[in-house]
Image (cartoon, grey):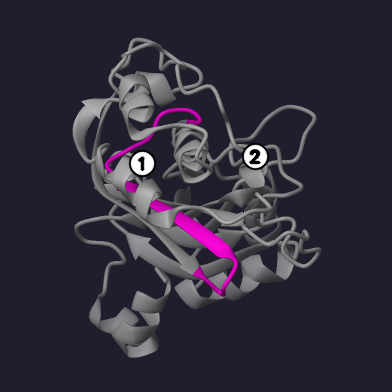
């Protein structure tokens, strides 16, 4: 009888054409499906919580697949990590209900965009930050971002429009802060996102932080309802999917609690 297995993945997206499988290019979904087939001897289709774009990273992407394999859940974690390249890792594996849907059942997603203020670029961080090269007004950036909280039409911050879908999303939380002396982190928590939404928001807020856009101009774009009005799309390399939230995941059964303490499971989201 088939079982459904859920995984929490961490990956560096630099060399991938995004999460979703595509013809003639490498994707995170593609290399994971190959690893599953090598481990179990059977092909399985992987379904993810979100389709991160080319070059976008993930700290805790959630995926699931169905399998007839009777391997232990820990064997799935260690076995898949054996077959995966160094830039993709399974941080946690869980048996879940057969109707678990990582995309449809998600109640929130957190993305973080990281910028670098230092005058010189950082070779050790170049794949993970967008180099700005000057000091930003963090307080003003927070003021702009706070205006996006709540339910609103995010069409101005949308790339490709969803076919037949709404551009209304609910933004639960926004925050900008400075860390490590020269990094600016912009973090958004929402129920779901549109194509390029985070990178377009980050671009507009960066304009505010650089003094190239006033708060009134930011509001005018945000309230315009014009598709793609926020035209500055920051590079994908600065973006990381930090967390996907569910009401009852990871499923802490007695066995999983015994194998992985609640602290360890909680650390998957940090």
Judge whether residue 61 can be spotted in this image: no
Residue under pointer 2: 235
Residue range of the region highlighted in magenta in the rendering: 179-196
For mark 2, does the 10 Å Cα neighbourhood hold few (<14), some (14 to 19), or many (20 or more) residues?
A: some
- Residue at (62, 55) in percent of width and height: 36
What is the tally of numbered marks visible in this picture?
Answer: 2
Instruction: Please provide percent x and percent y for residue 228.
Output: 47, 17
**Front residue (pair 93, 70):** 93
Percent position of residue 107, x then y: 24, 47
Residue 225, image x, y percentages: 31, 14
Up/down of 200 relative to 174, above or below: above
Q: Which sits in the foreground, 73 or 30? A: 30
Q: Is disc 2 placed on a helix, strand or loop?
A: loop
User: Who's the residue at 18% across and 32% down the image?
Assistant: 151
Side of 99 where 112 appears, left or right = right
- Percent across and percent down for residue 16 are 72, 44
In depth, the one of 203 and 108 nearer the eye is 203
Compared to residue 213, the image places residue 185 above or below, namely below
Disc with the residue nearer the chain's start (1 vs 2): 1
> 170 or 253: which is nearer to us?
170
Left or right placement of residue 42 versus residue 174 in this view:
right
The dot on residue 103 is 1
Picture residue at 22% right of the left edge, 27% below the top:
152
């Amino acid at each position: 009888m088939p079982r459904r297995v859920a995984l929490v993945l961490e990956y560096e997206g630099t060399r991938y054409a995004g999460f979703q499988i595509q013809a003639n290019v490498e994707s995170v979904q593609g290399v994971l499906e190959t690893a599953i087939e090598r481990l179990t001897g059977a092909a399985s289709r992987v379904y993810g919580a979100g389709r991160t774009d080319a070059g976008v990273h993930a700290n805790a992407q959630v995926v699931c697949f169905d399998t007839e394999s009777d391997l232990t859940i820990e064997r799935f974690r260690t076995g898949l990590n054996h077959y995966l390249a160094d830039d993709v890792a399974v941080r946690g594996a869980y048996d879940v209900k057969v109707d678990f849907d990582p995309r449809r059942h998600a109640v929130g997603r957190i993305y973080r965009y990281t910028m670098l203020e230092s005058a010189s670029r950082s070779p050790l961080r170049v794949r993970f930050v967008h180099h700005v090269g000057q000091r930003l007004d963090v307080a003003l950036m927070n003021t702009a971002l706070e205006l996006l909280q709540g339910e609103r039409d995010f069409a101005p911050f949308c790339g490709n429009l969803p076919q037949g879908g709404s551009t209304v999303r609910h933004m639960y939380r926004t925050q900008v802060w400075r860390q490590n002396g020269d990094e600016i982190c912009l973090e958004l928590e929402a129920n779901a996102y549109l194509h390029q939404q985070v990178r377009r928001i980050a671009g507009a807020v960066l304009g505010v932080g650089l003094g190239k856009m006033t708060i009134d101009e930011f509001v005018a774009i945000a309230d315009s309802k014009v598709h793609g009005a926020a035209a500055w799309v920051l590079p994908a390399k600065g973006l990381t999917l930090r967390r996907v939230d569910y009401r009852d995941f990871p499923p802490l059964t007695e066995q999983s609690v015994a194998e992985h303490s609640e602290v360890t499971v909680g650390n998957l989201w940090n």
